[in-house]
Image (cartoon, rainbow, N blue to C red):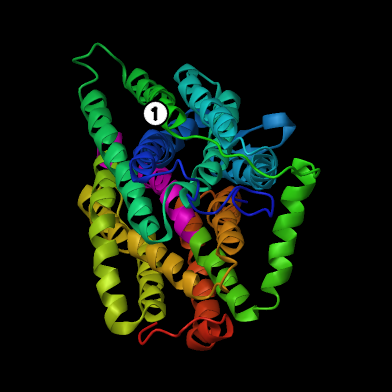
Amino acid sequence: MNAETADTTEPTGPTEGSDGAASRRREQRGWYFYDFACSVYSTSVLTVFIGPYLTSIAKASADADGFVHPLGIPVRAGSLFPYAISVSVVIAVILMPIAGAAADRTGRKKPLLAAAAYVGAAATTGMFFLDGHRYLLGAFLLIVANASVSVSMVLYNAYLPQIAEPDERDAVSSRGWAFGYTSGAFVLVLNLVLYTGHDSFGLSESDAVRICLASAGVWWGAFTIVPLRRLRDRKVAPSGEGAVGSGWRQLLATLRDMRRHPLTLSFLLAYLVYNDGVQTVISQASVYGSEELGLDQTTLITAVLLVQVLAVAGALGMGRLARTYGAKRTILGSLVVWTLILLAGYFLPAGKPAFFYALAAAIGLVLGGSQALSRSLFSHLVPRGKEAEYFSAYEMSDRGLSWLGPLVFGLAYQLTGSYRDAIVSLVAFFAIGSVLLARVPIRRAVAAAGNPVPERI
């Protein structure tokens, strides 16, 4: 839950007299840098390096049947990474409302943001020590880092209504997003140089990967100093509620209120399903590429760079399509493309980087647009005066509930021993999500929320 949602929180806009335009711009510039700091974790660590590397460590530690036994539980080595992602998201779901409520109650978002950021950065930096058979340490550090980045993003996003006027927020939010993509792409280029030239640097391949992992944690921690220096906390009205209780009570109250707007809730359910598929494809693509297709790390890095670049172009292109055909139809079209991507991935030949690049290009073209249009479409379905709490639930679903896809992926591999079967199992998320979205009468849903119905939606 975002810290902006409780009744006792600070004002939802930058209304204090000391918050002039210059002061707001200073805070906004500092705010951008948290995206710049933590996005490197998402791109370099989660999307590129940790999946294949942790899987290789687990396989080196596996028994003759290919199983490792964390806490005595038999787990196929190739399923360890997706299972760890699922566990991290469940932990984040528990912690996010607690962190949000603590920020509401005390008004001290900055110390909480610092704690979440530096716990995550420390766990990521600690990945330098993942060698030999330390798969348990790797899974633990991944769980800590992934849960930490989710908690920190809730607190980070809660600053937006305080540092930007309503008519500024789209632009400010977009700049933060651009900062994140810029840092992710820049560090990936540095990673590519280090990894491909590791021999000339006197490093083994494993050393290069571990340095890339640890450097993301150092980058995350170093650039977090900027927002911590620029952002400031606001006073709040006193509240006697505890952080745990008030956080969960507010979330439940928002969900109960959504029952009065069943069409809005129906859209959110559809989004939950297909977004889970999107997030799982992104997190598991590098494992699929390395383990099933036999592609090297250089190919994976350049493929992710391609996704980063084309995601921006795709978002702009799908925005234009939405102006012509409406957001709902455009999103449904993107879900068809996602399904075709998975089916093509199932038949992708091993050892053929060109085909993997083509698939990465397709992912990039639909990734940014499907997520951007989903958020904008949801904004039309939110009753006036309840934007903060409804978008808190949306943020929870976007960041906190994407655990089922990795679990299904891991179980499919656990049961079949085939990454091709695991990747094609994700088609269910896009198929079910498409059916649920198609059944939502969007124009009626907008009107039911009390909002004007756009000509194209």
Q: Nearer the viewer, residue 410 or 108?
A: 108
Q: Nearer the viewer, residue 353 or 233?
A: 233
In this figure, what is the number of numbered marks?
1
What is the magenta segment's predominant secondary structure?
A: helix
318 left or right of 52 in image: left
Q: Residue 417's spot in the image, x, y percent?
A: 53, 48
- In the rendered image, the quadrant that contains the C terminus is bottom left
Q: Which residue is mark 1?
A: 226
Q: Nearer the viewer, residue 309 or 299?
A: 309
Image point (39%, 60%), residue name: 346
The answer to whether 126 is drawn above or below residue 78 in the figure is above
Is any atom of residue 100 visible in this view? yes
Is any atom of residue 62 visible in this view? no
Image point (52%, 80%), residue name: 435
Image point (32%, 59%), residue name: 363
Magenta span contains residue 181: no
The answer to whether 257 is drawn above or below residue 108 in the figure is below
Residue at the far front in the pictured view:
17
Image point (56%, 26%), residue name: 119
- Residue 152 position by quadrant: top right
Q: Residue 44's spot in the image, x, y percent?
A: 36, 35
Instruction: Magenta stretch: give its range.
Output: 277-299
Q: Residue 1's spot in the image, x, y percent?
A: 63, 51
Q: State the SS at label 1.
A: helix
Q: Residue 182's spot in the image, x, y percent?
A: 27, 41
Crowd rating for badge 1 (residues with CA inside 10 Å; few <14, some 14–19, many 20+): some
Instruction: Tell me the kind of residue under disc 1.
Output: Val
The answer to whether 288 is drawn above or below residue 296 in the figure is below
Q: Nearer the viewer, residue 65 or 221?
A: 221
253 left or right of 435 in image: right
